[in-house]
Amino acid sequence: MELPRAAGSFRNYLYLYKGSWPPPPVLLGAMLMQTHFKHRSTDIFLSSFIKSGTTWLKVLEK
């Protein structure tokens, strides 16, 4: 599959994928997850910025 690309920073390219221009590692992770990950109705996704209390929030969840 050939994706449109544009010059990015540090001599890398950014690729247009589903309306956004993610950096290559993010793009690879997204494509692998969409291909292989099978979700369940009970799955919960928790995401946050680094050092913003994620561990504390996960403890409250239990």
Image (spheres, rainbow, N blue to C red):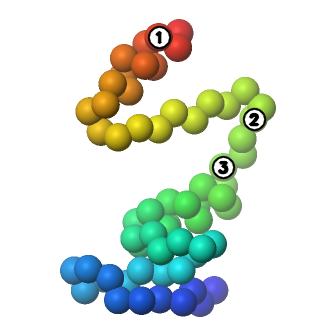
Residue at 63%, 86% in the rendered image: 1
- Counting other residues with Cα less than 10 Å from the Cα at mark 2, is it few (<14), some (14-19), or many (20 or more)? few
Secondary-structure class at tag 2: loop
Sequence-first disc among 1 and 3? 3
Instruction: List the residue tagged with mark 3.
Output: 37
Q: Nearer the viewer, residue 25 or 36?
A: 25
Image position of 11 (left or right of 2): left
Residue 43, image x and y in percent? 67, 31
Q: Which mark is residue 40?
A: 2
Residue that label 1 marks: 60
Q: Does 7 sit above or below residue 51?
A: below
Q: Give residue 12's quadrant in the image.
A: bottom left
Amino acid marked by disc 1: Leu
Side of 30 where 10 appears, left or right: left
Q: Relative to residue 1, is residue 21 depicted above or below? A: above
> Looking at the image, is mark 1 or mark 2 earlier in the sequence?
2
